[in-house]
Image: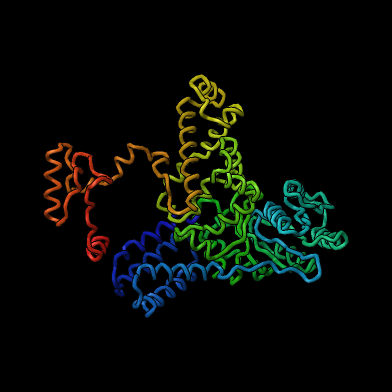
Amino acid sequence: MFANLSDRLTASFKQLRGRGRLSEADIDATVSEIRRALLDADVALPVVRSFTANVRERAKSAEVSGALNPAQQIIKIVNAELVEILGGQARDLHMAKQPPTVIMLAGLQGAGKTTLAGKLGLWLREQGHTPLLVASDLQRPNAVTQLQVVGQQAGVAVWAPEPGNGVGDPVAVARSGVQHARDKQYSVVVVDTAGRLGIDAEMMQQAADIRDAVRPDETLFVLDAMIGQDAVTTANAFAEGVGFSGVVLTKLDGDARGGAALSVRGVTGKPVLFASVGEKLSDFERFHADRMASRILDMGDILTLIEQAERTFDAGQAEEMAAKLAGQGDFTLQDFLGQLNQLKKMGSMKKMLGMLPGMGQMREQLENFDEREVDRVEAIVHSMTPAERNDPRILNGSRRQRIARGSGTTVAEVNSLVERFEQAKTMMRQMARSGGKGVPGMGMMPGGGKKSKGRMAPPPKKGKKGKSGNPAKRAQQEVELSQKTGTRPAAGASFGLGGAGGGQAQEMPDLEELQKYLR
Protein backbone atom coordinates (compact mmCIF):
# COMPACT_ATOMS: atom_id res chain seq x y z
CA MET A 1 0.00 0.00 0.00
CA PHE A 2 2.78 2.43 0.85
CA ALA A 3 4.91 1.57 -2.19
CA ASN A 4 4.40 4.90 -3.97
CA LEU A 5 4.90 6.95 -0.80
CA SER A 6 8.03 4.95 0.05
CA ASP A 7 9.50 5.51 -3.41
CA ARG A 8 8.81 9.26 -3.27
CA LEU A 9 10.33 9.69 0.19
CA THR A 10 13.46 7.66 -0.52
CA ALA A 11 13.95 9.57 -3.79
CA SER A 12 13.82 12.88 -1.92
CA PHE A 13 16.65 11.68 0.36
CA LYS A 14 18.96 10.63 -2.47
CA GLN A 15 19.81 14.20 -3.40
CA LEU A 16 21.09 14.79 0.15
CA ARG A 17 23.66 12.01 0.10
CA GLY A 18 27.25 13.10 -0.02
CA ARG A 19 26.54 16.57 1.38
CA GLY A 20 28.88 17.61 4.14
CA ARG A 21 26.50 20.29 5.37
CA LEU A 22 22.90 21.12 4.49
CA SER A 23 21.87 24.62 3.56
CA GLU A 24 18.41 26.06 4.14
CA ALA A 25 17.73 25.67 0.43
CA ASP A 26 18.47 21.93 0.66
CA ILE A 27 16.16 21.54 3.65
CA ASP A 28 13.35 23.52 1.99
CA ALA A 29 13.63 21.48 -1.21
CA THR A 30 13.54 18.20 0.72
CA VAL A 31 10.56 19.27 2.83
CA SER A 32 8.71 20.35 -0.34
CA GLU A 33 9.28 16.92 -1.85
CA ILE A 34 8.02 15.28 1.34
CA ARG A 35 4.91 17.50 1.31
CA ARG A 36 4.10 16.55 -2.29
CA ALA A 37 4.64 12.86 -1.51
CA LEU A 38 2.25 12.99 1.45
CA LEU A 39 -0.42 14.90 -0.48
CA ASP A 40 -0.18 12.41 -3.35
CA ALA A 41 -0.70 9.64 -0.80
CA ASP A 42 -4.05 11.19 0.24
CA VAL A 43 -2.86 12.26 3.68
CA ALA A 44 -5.11 14.87 5.27
CA LEU A 45 -3.92 18.45 4.78
CA PRO A 46 -3.73 19.34 8.53
CA VAL A 47 -1.56 16.29 9.12
CA VAL A 48 0.72 17.22 6.21
CA ARG A 49 1.15 20.77 7.47
CA SER A 50 1.98 19.64 11.00
CA PHE A 51 4.37 16.95 9.75
CA THR A 52 6.36 19.17 7.38
CA ALA A 53 6.52 22.01 9.91
CA ASN A 54 8.01 19.71 12.55
CA VAL A 55 10.52 18.24 10.08
CA ARG A 56 11.65 21.71 8.92
CA GLU A 57 12.00 23.00 12.47
CA ARG A 58 14.07 20.04 13.64
CA ALA A 59 16.16 19.97 10.45
CA LYS A 60 17.21 23.59 10.84
CA SER A 61 18.12 23.18 14.49
CA ALA A 62 21.49 22.28 15.98
CA GLU A 63 20.34 18.67 15.85
CA VAL A 64 21.50 18.52 12.21
CA SER A 65 24.15 21.23 12.01
CA GLY A 66 26.49 19.30 14.29
CA ALA A 67 25.82 15.90 12.77
CA LEU A 68 28.51 14.03 10.92
CA ASN A 69 26.04 12.91 8.23
CA PRO A 70 23.21 15.43 7.84
CA ALA A 71 21.38 13.32 5.24
CA GLN A 72 21.07 10.40 7.62
CA GLN A 73 19.98 12.77 10.35
CA ILE A 74 17.15 14.04 8.10
CA ILE A 75 16.03 10.47 7.56
CA LYS A 76 16.09 9.94 11.31
CA ILE A 77 13.93 13.03 11.84
CA VAL A 78 11.40 11.94 9.19
CA ASN A 79 11.26 8.47 10.73
CA ALA A 80 10.60 9.93 14.20
CA GLU A 81 7.82 12.17 12.86
CA LEU A 82 6.25 9.25 10.97
CA VAL A 83 6.22 7.23 14.16
CA GLU A 84 4.54 10.13 15.93
CA ILE A 85 1.71 10.63 13.41
CA LEU A 86 1.17 6.86 13.20
CA GLY A 87 0.55 6.64 16.93
CA GLY A 88 3.85 6.48 18.76
CA GLN A 89 4.15 3.73 21.34
CA ALA A 90 1.97 0.67 20.71
CA ARG A 91 -0.90 0.22 23.18
CA ASP A 92 -2.39 -3.04 24.42
CA LEU A 93 -6.09 -3.75 24.74
CA HIS A 94 -7.68 -2.58 27.97
CA MET A 95 -8.83 -5.76 29.67
CA ALA A 96 -11.59 -5.66 32.29
CA LYS A 97 -10.71 -6.42 35.89
CA GLN A 98 -13.73 -8.69 36.07
CA PRO A 99 -14.24 -10.78 32.92
CA PRO A 100 -15.63 -10.75 30.37
CA THR A 101 -13.89 -7.93 28.54
CA VAL A 102 -16.33 -6.44 26.01
CA ILE A 103 -14.99 -5.23 22.64
CA MET A 104 -17.40 -3.50 20.28
CA LEU A 105 -16.71 -3.13 16.54
CA ALA A 106 -18.13 -0.14 14.64
CA GLY A 107 -17.68 1.17 11.11
CA LEU A 108 -19.15 1.51 7.66
CA GLN A 109 -20.51 -1.42 5.70
CA GLY A 110 -17.83 -2.99 3.55
CA ALA A 111 -14.98 -2.09 5.90
CA GLY A 112 -14.60 -5.76 6.88
CA LYS A 113 -16.03 -5.82 10.42
CA THR A 114 -17.42 -9.37 10.31
CA THR A 115 -14.23 -10.89 8.93
CA LEU A 116 -12.24 -8.80 11.38
CA ALA A 117 -14.32 -10.20 14.25
CA GLY A 118 -13.13 -13.70 13.29
CA LYS A 119 -9.51 -12.53 12.94
CA LEU A 120 -9.64 -10.81 16.33
CA GLY A 121 -11.23 -13.89 17.88
CA LEU A 122 -8.47 -16.12 16.48
CA TRP A 123 -5.79 -13.69 17.71
CA LEU A 124 -7.33 -13.59 21.20
CA ARG A 125 -7.54 -17.39 21.30
CA GLU A 126 -3.84 -17.64 20.41
CA GLN A 127 -3.13 -15.20 23.25
CA GLY A 128 -4.72 -17.60 25.73
CA HIS A 129 -8.19 -16.02 26.00
CA THR A 130 -11.58 -17.68 25.46
CA PRO A 131 -13.44 -15.28 23.14
CA LEU A 132 -17.11 -15.24 22.16
CA LEU A 133 -18.37 -13.57 18.97
CA VAL A 134 -21.80 -11.91 19.18
CA ALA A 135 -23.80 -11.47 15.94
CA SER A 136 -25.52 -8.09 16.42
CA ASP A 137 -25.55 -7.24 12.72
CA LEU A 138 -29.11 -8.31 11.95
CA GLN A 139 -29.72 -6.11 8.89
CA ARG A 140 -27.15 -7.03 6.25
CA PRO A 141 -28.22 -10.19 4.40
CA ASN A 142 -26.46 -13.33 5.68
CA ALA A 143 -24.29 -11.33 8.09
CA VAL A 144 -25.13 -13.77 10.91
CA THR A 145 -24.32 -16.77 8.72
CA GLN A 146 -21.03 -15.20 7.68
CA LEU A 147 -20.02 -14.66 11.30
CA GLN A 148 -20.88 -18.26 12.13
CA VAL A 149 -18.74 -19.55 9.27
CA VAL A 150 -15.84 -17.26 10.20
CA GLY A 151 -16.11 -18.26 13.86
CA GLN A 152 -16.04 -21.95 12.94
CA GLN A 153 -12.92 -21.43 10.84
CA ALA A 154 -11.25 -19.56 13.70
CA GLY A 155 -12.31 -22.12 16.30
CA VAL A 156 -14.24 -19.49 18.27
CA ALA A 157 -17.77 -19.76 19.67
CA VAL A 158 -20.53 -17.56 18.19
CA TRP A 159 -23.67 -16.27 19.93
CA ALA A 160 -26.40 -15.86 17.30
CA PRO A 161 -29.91 -16.25 18.77
CA GLU A 162 -31.52 -14.35 15.86
CA PRO A 163 -31.35 -15.33 12.15
CA GLY A 164 -30.80 -11.76 11.00
CA ASN A 165 -31.83 -10.54 7.53
CA GLY A 166 -33.90 -7.79 9.15
CA VAL A 167 -35.31 -9.96 11.97
CA GLY A 168 -34.54 -9.35 15.65
CA ASP A 169 -33.36 -6.61 18.00
CA PRO A 170 -29.57 -6.03 17.78
CA VAL A 171 -29.46 -4.32 21.19
CA ALA A 172 -31.13 -7.30 22.88
CA VAL A 173 -28.78 -9.72 21.10
CA ALA A 174 -25.72 -7.78 22.29
CA ARG A 175 -27.02 -7.65 25.87
CA SER A 176 -27.86 -11.35 25.94
CA GLY A 177 -24.47 -12.19 24.39
CA VAL A 178 -22.61 -10.48 27.22
CA GLN A 179 -24.78 -12.26 29.78
CA HIS A 180 -24.17 -15.60 28.08
CA ALA A 181 -20.41 -14.96 28.15
CA ARG A 182 -20.62 -14.15 31.85
CA ASP A 183 -22.57 -17.33 32.56
CA LYS A 184 -20.26 -19.59 30.51
CA GLN A 185 -17.12 -17.81 31.75
CA TYR A 186 -15.83 -16.51 28.42
CA SER A 187 -13.01 -14.04 28.99
CA VAL A 188 -13.63 -11.73 25.99
CA VAL A 189 -16.76 -10.77 24.04
CA VAL A 190 -16.47 -9.32 20.52
CA VAL A 191 -19.69 -7.61 19.40
CA ASP A 192 -20.17 -7.29 15.63
CA THR A 193 -22.49 -4.39 14.80
CA ALA A 194 -24.25 -3.32 11.62
CA GLY A 195 -22.84 -0.84 9.14
CA ARG A 196 -24.22 1.35 6.40
CA LEU A 197 -23.04 2.48 3.02
CA GLY A 198 -23.10 6.00 4.39
CA ILE A 199 -23.31 7.81 7.71
CA ASP A 200 -26.89 8.37 8.90
CA ALA A 201 -28.68 9.10 12.16
CA GLU A 202 -30.29 5.65 12.39
CA MET A 203 -26.96 3.89 12.15
CA MET A 204 -25.35 6.12 14.76
CA GLN A 205 -28.30 5.73 17.13
CA GLN A 206 -28.25 1.93 16.88
CA ALA A 207 -24.50 1.81 17.55
CA ALA A 208 -24.92 4.19 20.50
CA ASP A 209 -27.74 2.01 21.94
CA ILE A 210 -25.56 -1.11 21.72
CA ARG A 211 -22.73 0.80 23.37
CA ASP A 212 -24.98 1.86 26.25
CA ALA A 213 -26.33 -1.70 26.62
CA VAL A 214 -23.01 -3.58 26.82
CA ARG A 215 -20.72 -0.80 28.15
CA PRO A 216 -17.68 -1.96 26.16
CA ASP A 217 -14.17 -1.78 27.57
CA GLU A 218 -12.88 -1.11 24.03
CA THR A 219 -14.77 0.38 21.09
CA LEU A 220 -12.78 -0.25 17.92
CA PHE A 221 -13.46 1.79 14.80
CA VAL A 222 -12.91 -0.46 11.77
CA LEU A 223 -11.56 1.67 8.94
CA ASP A 224 -10.97 0.68 5.33
CA ALA A 225 -7.45 1.91 4.60
CA MET A 226 -8.28 2.30 0.90
CA ILE A 227 -10.93 5.03 1.14
CA GLY A 228 -8.47 7.94 1.19
CA GLN A 229 -9.49 11.42 2.33
CA ASP A 230 -13.02 10.28 3.25
CA ALA A 231 -11.47 8.40 6.19
CA VAL A 232 -11.11 11.67 8.08
CA THR A 233 -14.79 12.59 7.68
CA THR A 234 -15.96 9.11 8.64
CA ALA A 235 -13.68 8.93 11.67
CA ASN A 236 -14.83 12.31 12.95
CA ALA A 237 -18.50 11.34 12.52
CA PHE A 238 -18.05 8.12 14.52
CA ALA A 239 -16.01 9.92 17.18
CA GLU A 240 -18.84 12.39 17.71
CA GLY A 241 -21.77 9.97 17.33
CA VAL A 242 -20.53 6.82 19.09
CA GLY A 243 -17.00 7.43 20.31
CA PHE A 244 -14.21 4.93 20.01
CA SER A 245 -11.02 4.14 21.88
CA GLY A 246 -8.93 2.65 19.07
CA VAL A 247 -8.73 2.10 15.33
CA VAL A 248 -8.32 -1.08 13.29
CA LEU A 249 -7.09 -0.70 9.72
CA THR A 250 -8.27 -3.24 7.16
CA LYS A 251 -7.12 -4.00 3.61
CA LEU A 252 -3.57 -2.83 4.22
CA ASP A 253 -2.49 -5.31 1.56
CA GLY A 254 -4.29 -3.28 -1.12
CA ASP A 255 -2.70 -1.03 -3.71
CA ALA A 256 -4.32 2.24 -2.62
CA ARG A 257 -2.23 5.21 -1.58
CA GLY A 258 -2.59 4.67 2.16
CA GLY A 259 -3.38 8.18 3.34
CA ALA A 260 -6.04 6.93 5.76
CA ALA A 261 -3.46 5.16 7.91
CA LEU A 262 -1.42 8.35 8.21
CA SER A 263 -4.41 10.64 8.73
CA VAL A 264 -6.74 9.00 11.24
CA ARG A 265 -4.34 9.14 14.20
CA GLY A 266 -3.44 12.78 13.56
CA VAL A 267 -7.07 13.86 13.16
CA THR A 268 -8.82 11.85 15.89
CA GLY A 269 -5.95 11.37 18.33
CA LYS A 270 -6.93 7.71 18.80
CA PRO A 271 -4.24 5.04 18.36
CA VAL A 272 -4.24 2.35 15.69
CA LEU A 273 -4.27 -0.96 17.57
CA PHE A 274 -4.48 -3.63 14.87
CA ALA A 275 -4.05 -4.05 11.14
CA SER A 276 -5.54 -6.58 8.73
CA VAL A 277 -2.93 -7.38 6.10
CA GLY A 278 -4.58 -10.11 4.02
CA GLU A 279 -7.62 -12.25 3.35
CA LYS A 280 -6.73 -15.18 5.60
CA LEU A 281 -7.80 -15.21 9.23
CA SER A 282 -4.16 -15.37 10.24
CA ASP A 283 -3.34 -12.18 8.29
CA PHE A 284 -3.88 -10.04 11.37
CA GLU A 285 -1.24 -8.33 13.46
CA ARG A 286 -0.64 -5.70 16.10
CA PHE A 287 0.00 -2.29 14.64
CA HIS A 288 3.43 -0.93 15.57
CA ALA A 289 4.03 2.65 14.48
CA ASP A 290 7.82 2.33 14.47
CA ARG A 291 7.72 -0.80 12.30
CA MET A 292 5.29 0.76 9.84
CA ALA A 293 7.48 3.85 9.60
CA SER A 294 10.47 1.61 8.87
CA ARG A 295 8.52 -0.08 6.08
CA ILE A 296 7.61 3.26 4.55
CA LEU A 297 11.24 4.41 4.62
CA ASP A 298 12.39 1.08 3.11
CA MET A 299 14.19 0.05 6.29
CA GLY A 300 12.38 -3.26 6.53
CA ASP A 301 10.46 -4.86 9.38
CA ILE A 302 12.66 -7.61 10.76
CA LEU A 303 10.88 -7.78 14.13
CA THR A 304 7.53 -8.68 12.56
CA LEU A 305 9.27 -11.25 10.38
CA ILE A 306 10.87 -12.82 13.46
CA GLU A 307 7.53 -12.91 15.30
CA GLN A 308 5.88 -14.68 12.36
CA ALA A 309 8.71 -17.21 12.27
CA GLU A 310 8.41 -17.86 16.01
CA ARG A 311 4.67 -18.50 15.66
CA THR A 312 5.14 -20.84 12.70
CA PHE A 313 8.36 -22.78 13.16
CA ASP A 314 8.63 -25.73 15.50
CA ALA A 315 11.55 -25.21 17.89
CA GLY A 316 12.35 -28.92 18.11
CA GLN A 317 12.33 -29.33 14.36
CA ALA A 318 14.50 -26.24 13.94
CA GLU A 319 17.10 -27.65 16.37
CA GLU A 320 17.09 -30.96 14.50
CA MET A 321 17.68 -29.19 11.19
CA ALA A 322 20.48 -27.11 12.71
CA ALA A 323 22.16 -30.28 13.98
CA LYS A 324 21.96 -31.85 10.54
CA LEU A 325 23.46 -28.77 8.92
CA ALA A 326 26.27 -28.83 11.47
CA GLY A 327 27.21 -32.31 10.30
CA GLN A 328 25.29 -34.49 12.77
CA GLY A 329 23.35 -36.32 10.07
CA ASP A 330 22.52 -35.67 6.46
CA PHE A 331 20.25 -32.85 5.33
CA THR A 332 18.03 -34.45 2.67
CA LEU A 333 15.40 -33.28 0.22
CA GLN A 334 12.77 -34.60 2.62
CA ASP A 335 14.06 -32.19 5.27
CA PHE A 336 14.11 -29.44 2.67
CA LEU A 337 10.46 -30.18 1.88
CA GLY A 338 9.58 -29.82 5.55
CA GLN A 339 11.33 -26.47 5.75
CA LEU A 340 9.49 -25.35 2.62
CA ASN A 341 6.14 -26.21 4.21
CA GLN A 342 7.11 -24.21 7.29
CA LEU A 343 7.83 -21.19 5.09
CA LYS A 344 4.49 -21.57 3.32
CA LYS A 345 2.73 -21.42 6.71
CA MET A 346 4.25 -17.98 7.29
CA GLY A 347 2.29 -16.60 4.33
CA SER A 348 3.17 -14.98 1.05
CA MET A 349 6.81 -15.10 0.02
CA LYS A 350 6.44 -11.63 -1.51
CA LYS A 351 5.24 -10.27 1.80
CA MET A 352 8.11 -11.84 3.72
CA LEU A 353 10.69 -10.62 1.22
CA GLY A 354 9.14 -7.15 1.36
CA MET A 355 9.95 -6.97 5.08
CA LEU A 356 13.67 -7.11 4.39
CA PRO A 357 15.58 -3.80 4.40
CA GLY A 358 16.26 -2.26 1.00
CA MET A 359 13.71 -4.34 -0.89
CA GLY A 360 12.08 -1.14 -2.17
CA GLN A 361 14.95 -0.87 -4.64
CA MET A 362 13.99 -4.29 -6.00
CA ARG A 363 10.23 -3.73 -6.11
CA GLU A 364 9.93 -4.57 -9.79
CA GLN A 365 11.74 -7.90 -9.34
CA LEU A 366 9.64 -8.55 -6.23
CA GLU A 367 6.40 -7.94 -8.11
CA ASN A 368 7.53 -10.30 -10.86
CA PHE A 369 8.31 -13.04 -8.34
CA ASP A 370 6.18 -16.09 -9.17
CA GLU A 371 4.66 -17.60 -6.02
CA ARG A 372 3.92 -20.77 -8.00
CA GLU A 373 7.65 -21.50 -8.21
CA VAL A 374 7.41 -22.83 -4.65
CA ASP A 375 4.62 -25.19 -5.74
CA ARG A 376 6.74 -26.43 -8.66
CA VAL A 377 9.64 -27.20 -6.34
CA GLU A 378 7.29 -29.02 -3.99
CA ALA A 379 5.84 -31.03 -6.91
CA ILE A 380 9.33 -32.09 -8.06
CA VAL A 381 10.30 -33.32 -4.58
CA HIS A 382 6.96 -35.13 -4.15
CA SER A 383 7.57 -36.94 -7.46
CA MET A 384 10.74 -38.53 -6.05
CA THR A 385 10.87 -41.81 -4.19
CA PRO A 386 12.01 -41.80 -0.54
CA ALA A 387 15.36 -43.23 -1.60
CA GLU A 388 15.85 -40.45 -4.15
CA ARG A 389 15.00 -37.77 -1.60
CA ASN A 390 17.51 -39.19 0.86
CA ASP A 391 20.28 -39.55 -1.74
CA PRO A 392 19.93 -37.39 -4.88
CA ARG A 393 23.17 -38.88 -6.21
CA ILE A 394 21.25 -41.92 -7.50
CA LEU A 395 19.26 -39.72 -9.89
CA ASN A 396 20.26 -40.89 -13.34
CA GLY A 397 18.77 -39.82 -16.65
CA SER A 398 15.75 -42.12 -16.61
CA ARG A 399 14.86 -41.21 -13.02
CA ARG A 400 15.02 -37.51 -13.82
CA GLN A 401 12.75 -37.99 -16.82
CA ARG A 402 10.24 -39.86 -14.65
CA ILE A 403 10.33 -37.09 -12.01
CA ALA A 404 9.83 -34.41 -14.69
CA ARG A 405 6.79 -36.22 -16.11
CA GLY A 406 5.34 -36.79 -12.65
CA SER A 407 5.69 -33.15 -11.58
CA GLY A 408 4.70 -31.57 -14.90
CA THR A 409 8.09 -29.91 -15.31
CA THR A 410 11.13 -30.39 -17.51
CA VAL A 411 14.31 -32.34 -16.92
CA ALA A 412 16.22 -29.05 -16.92
CA GLU A 413 14.12 -27.82 -13.99
CA VAL A 414 14.75 -31.05 -12.09
CA ASN A 415 18.49 -30.74 -12.71
CA SER A 416 18.45 -27.11 -11.60
CA LEU A 417 16.66 -27.96 -8.34
CA VAL A 418 19.08 -30.77 -7.47
CA GLU A 419 22.09 -28.58 -8.28
CA ARG A 420 20.81 -25.65 -6.22
CA PHE A 421 19.97 -27.96 -3.32
CA GLU A 422 23.49 -29.39 -3.21
CA GLN A 423 25.02 -25.93 -3.43
CA ALA A 424 22.77 -24.52 -0.70
CA LYS A 425 23.42 -27.52 1.58
CA THR A 426 27.17 -27.09 1.21
CA MET A 427 26.98 -23.36 1.92
CA MET A 428 24.72 -23.73 4.98
CA ARG A 429 26.92 -26.49 6.39
CA GLN A 430 30.00 -24.30 6.04
CA MET A 431 28.19 -21.44 7.75
CA ALA A 432 27.06 -23.70 10.59
CA ARG A 433 30.58 -25.01 11.17
CA SER A 434 32.06 -21.50 11.08
CA GLY A 435 29.59 -20.25 13.66
CA GLY A 436 27.75 -18.08 11.12
CA LYS A 437 30.73 -15.77 10.62
CA GLY A 438 30.87 -14.36 7.12
CA VAL A 439 29.19 -16.02 4.20
CA PRO A 440 31.42 -18.91 3.16
CA GLY A 441 30.71 -20.86 0.02
CA MET A 442 29.26 -17.97 -1.95
CA GLY A 443 30.67 -19.58 -5.08
CA MET A 444 28.27 -22.46 -4.47
CA MET A 445 25.20 -20.22 -4.68
CA PRO A 446 23.14 -20.21 -7.91
CA GLY A 447 24.91 -17.99 -10.38
CA GLY A 448 28.09 -18.25 -8.31
CA GLY A 449 30.04 -20.80 -10.34
CA LYS A 450 33.27 -20.47 -12.24
CA LYS A 451 31.80 -18.31 -14.95
CA SER A 452 30.34 -15.82 -12.54
CA LYS A 453 33.60 -15.74 -10.59
CA GLY A 454 35.38 -14.83 -13.79
CA ARG A 455 32.90 -12.06 -14.47
CA MET A 456 32.83 -10.62 -10.97
CA ALA A 457 36.49 -10.96 -10.02
CA PRO A 458 38.60 -7.81 -10.47
CA PRO A 459 41.46 -7.93 -12.98
CA PRO A 460 44.68 -9.34 -11.50
CA LYS A 461 47.07 -6.75 -10.20
CA LYS A 462 50.39 -6.41 -11.90
CA GLY A 463 53.04 -7.48 -9.44
CA LYS A 464 56.45 -9.05 -9.35
CA LYS A 465 57.12 -11.82 -11.79
CA GLY A 466 57.16 -15.35 -10.43
CA LYS A 467 60.17 -17.63 -10.46
CA SER A 468 61.12 -18.94 -13.88
CA GLY A 469 60.85 -22.59 -14.75
CA ASN A 470 64.25 -22.44 -16.43
CA PRO A 471 66.85 -23.52 -13.82
CA ALA A 472 69.50 -21.10 -15.13
CA LYS A 473 67.15 -18.11 -15.15
CA ARG A 474 65.78 -19.08 -11.77
CA ALA A 475 69.29 -19.18 -10.28
CA GLN A 476 70.00 -15.73 -11.74
CA GLN A 477 66.76 -14.37 -10.23
CA GLU A 478 67.70 -15.63 -6.78
CA VAL A 479 71.17 -14.09 -7.05
CA GLU A 480 69.61 -10.71 -7.93
CA LEU A 481 67.12 -11.06 -5.08
CA SER A 482 69.92 -11.84 -2.59
CA GLN A 483 71.84 -8.75 -3.72
CA LYS A 484 68.79 -6.55 -3.07
CA THR A 485 67.91 -8.05 0.33
CA GLY A 486 71.44 -8.76 1.51
CA THR A 487 70.76 -12.46 2.06
CA ARG A 488 72.22 -15.57 0.52
CA PRO A 489 70.01 -18.03 -1.43
CA ALA A 490 69.61 -21.51 -0.01
CA ALA A 491 72.06 -23.97 -1.47
CA GLY A 492 70.54 -25.91 -4.33
CA ALA A 493 67.22 -24.12 -3.97
CA SER A 494 66.99 -23.36 -7.68
CA PHE A 495 67.19 -27.05 -8.53
CA GLY A 496 64.91 -28.31 -5.80
CA LEU A 497 67.81 -29.62 -3.73
CA GLY A 498 67.37 -27.36 -0.71
CA GLY A 499 66.06 -28.60 2.57
CA ALA A 500 67.47 -29.79 5.79
CA GLY A 501 70.83 -30.70 4.37
CA GLY A 502 73.35 -27.84 4.52
CA GLY A 503 71.22 -25.06 3.00
CA GLN A 504 71.31 -21.69 4.76
CA ALA A 505 67.82 -20.36 5.48
CA GLN A 506 66.87 -16.85 4.46
CA GLU A 507 66.94 -14.22 7.17
CA MET A 508 63.64 -12.78 8.41
CA PRO A 509 63.07 -9.10 7.54
CA ASP A 510 63.24 -6.46 10.23
CA LEU A 511 60.15 -6.26 12.48
CA GLU A 512 59.58 -2.55 11.76
CA GLU A 513 59.75 -3.22 8.03
CA LEU A 514 57.25 -6.07 8.44
CA GLN A 515 54.81 -3.86 10.37
CA LYS A 516 55.13 -1.15 7.73
CA TYR A 517 54.39 -3.70 5.05
CA LEU A 518 51.34 -5.02 6.88
CA ARG A 519 50.02 -1.50 7.39
In this view, the residue farthest toward the front is 502
Residue 401: % across, % down: 51, 21
Horizontal side of 179 relative to 393 (left or right) equals right
Q: Give the camera-side residue of 90 and 467.
A: 467
Can you give x and y, in whole percent of width and height, for residue 347 in the image? 59, 47
Give the quarter of the figure containing the C terminus.
Answer: bottom left
**Relative to 212, residue 285 above or below:** above
In which image quadrant can residue 64 be found?
A: bottom left
Foreground residue, 267 or 348? 348
Image location (x, y in percent) of residue 282: 65, 50
Q: Is residue 450 visible?
A: yes
Residue 16 location (% of width, % of height): 32, 65
Position above or below: 91 against 419: below
Q: Quadrant of residue 53?
A: bottom left
Q: Residue at x 23, y 43 (%)?
A: 498
Q: Which residue does the image show at 73% across and 46% down from the upper left?
A: 153
Furthest toward the top, the residue is 398
Classify residue 301 as left or right of residue 146: left
Spot the residue most to the right: 183
Which color scheme did the rendering employ for the protein? rainbow
Q: How many numbered badges does the structure rendering display?
A: 0
Q: Does residue 141 appear in the picture of this structure?
A: no
Residue 288's place in the image compared with 351, above or below, is below
Q: Residue at x 31, y 70 (%)?
A: 26
Q: Is residue 238 left or right of residue 456?
A: right
